[in-house]
Image (tube, grey):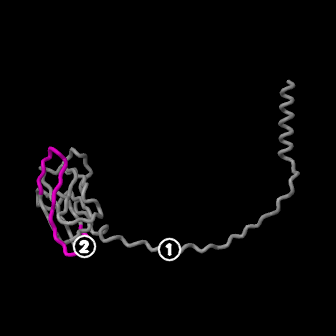
Amino acid sequence: MLRALALAMVLFMAAAVACSDDRPPTPAVTVTLAPVASPAATAVPAATPVANVCGPNPSPAPAVQPSDFSYRMIASPLPGAVVQSPLTVSGQANPFEGAFSVTVFSAAGQQIAAGDFNKSNLSPAFSVALPFSVMAPSPACVWYHERSGRDGSPINVTQVPVLLQP
């Protein structure tokens, strides 16, 4: 009981000291905010021609598993790559009956180079070389695609923007 009384007394004294008003009064503070000029807007750099060279995809490749037909994972060239002839396109794919095509289009949509290839579907890895010729550095769009059995048009297209070098 004596301990409880002593503890109560200590707590009371601590509270009294904490609440005492022996400190000098704090002067009032007035804060005035001055308007600050915002930094000038910075110009956003224009997109490089390579980034915008591929137009709308006419037949996007479906999202499928590696064991499914039409699967592809293009490892090279990477988007924005600077390439020289011959253009090497490599990666993993499982095209129907092993047949696929690579076509290179200029920024104006003109065909620069094209090739039809066949691969074994026993292994997904592939690598093909496609020669091309340009007179000056040229933004281009590389299409990896299959051909429609109905009319031969490109289907399941994967587009990769690149910069072709002479």
Crowding around mark 2 (Cα neighbors within 10 Å: few <14, some 14 to 19, many 20+) is: few
Q: Is residue 39 above or below residue 158?
A: below
Return the disc, 2 or 1, that comes first in the chain's sequence: 1
Q: Tag count in the figure?
A: 2
The residue that label 1 is drawn on is 41
The residue that label 2 is drawn on is 137
Q: Position of residue 97 (x, y in %)?
A: 12, 49
Q: Secondary structure at mark 2?
A: loop
Query: What span is colored magenta in the figure?
Result: 117-140
User: Quadrant where the C terminus lies?
Assistant: bottom left
Q: Residue at x 27, y 51 (%)?
A: 63
Q: Is residue 65 left or right of residue 5?
A: left
Three-letter residue code for mark 1: Ala
Task: Please check the rendered image and state whether residue 107 is part of the magenta-colored stretch, yes or no.
Answer: no
Three-letter residue code for mark 2: Pro
Q: Quadrant of residue 78?
A: bottom left
Q: Is residue 17 above or below residue 31?
A: above
Q: Residue at x 25, y 54 (%)?
A: 75
Q: Nearer the viewer, residue 146 or 120?
A: 120
Q: Residue at x 72, y 70 (%)?
A: 32
Q: Is residue 69 above or below residue 79?
A: above
User: Quadrant where the N terminus lies?
Assistant: top right
Disc 2 and disc 1: Cα gap in Å?
Answer: 32 Å
Q: Secondary structure at mark 1?
A: loop
Task: Please check the rendered image and state whether residue 138 is part of the magenta-colored stretch, yes or no.
Answer: yes
